Amino acid sequence: MTGVPAPRAGRQARRNEPAEGLRTHSAALLRHAQRLREGAAALDWKGPQAEAFRWRIEALAERCATAADGLARSAEQLDAAAGPR
């Protein structure tokens, strides 16, 4: 039995695929940043080493958020270059 292939996406949909991929990655990075922050806040650990650890986790979460912002801006630029949806 042979299957019928799924219809191909239209030209406009294919043109927006890279931007959608960037938005997907951006959202994933934001979720990672949030989970990092929540995990660090939930730790029941005190002392200078704990504070240093939390600082490192916050720095990593901030890097994730910064990268997510960059990906979102790139997606907007791709959308603008592709024209109206």
Image: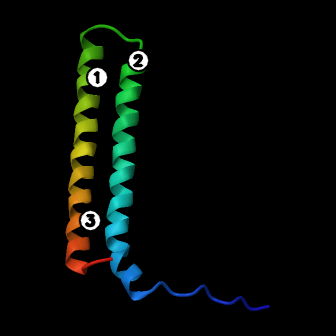
Looking at the image, residue 12 sits to the left or right of residue 72; the answer is right
Disc 1 to disc 2: CB gap under 8 Å: yes
| SS of the residue under disc 1 | helix
In front here: 56 or 13? 13
* Label 3 sits on residue: 75
Q: CA distance from mark 3 to mark 1?
A: 31 Å
Q: CA distance from mark 1 to mark 2?
A: 9 Å
Query: Quarter holding the C terminus?
Result: bottom left
* Label 2 sits on residue: 43
Dot 3 or dot 2: first in sequence order is 2
Q: Is residue 31 positioned above or below 71 on the image?
A: above
Residue at the front extreme of this rendering:
84
How crowded pointer 2 is (Cα within 10 Å; few <14, some 14-19, many 20+) is rated as: few
| SS of the residue under disc 3 | helix
Residue drawn at x 23%, y 38% is 62
Q: Nearer the viewer, mark 3 or mark 2?
A: 3
| SS of the residue under disc 2 | loop
How crowded pointer 1 is (Cα within 10 Å; few <14, some 14-19, many 20+) is rated as: some
x, y percent for residue 80: 21, 73
Disc 2 residue type?
Leu
Disc 3 to disc 1: CB gap under 8 Å: no
Q: Is residue 22 positioned above or below 2 on the image?
A: above
Disc 3 to disc 2: CB gap under 8 Å: no
Q: Which circle marks residue 80 in the picture?
A: none
Q: Which circle marks residue 54 in the picture?
A: 1
Which image quadrant is residue 12 in? bottom left
Which image quadrant is residue 33 in? top left
Residue at the top extreme of this rendering:
47
Q: CA distance from mark 3 to mark 2?
A: 35 Å
Dot 1 or dot 2: first in sequence order is 2
Disc 1 residue type?
Arg
Query: Quarter holding the N terminus?
Result: bottom right
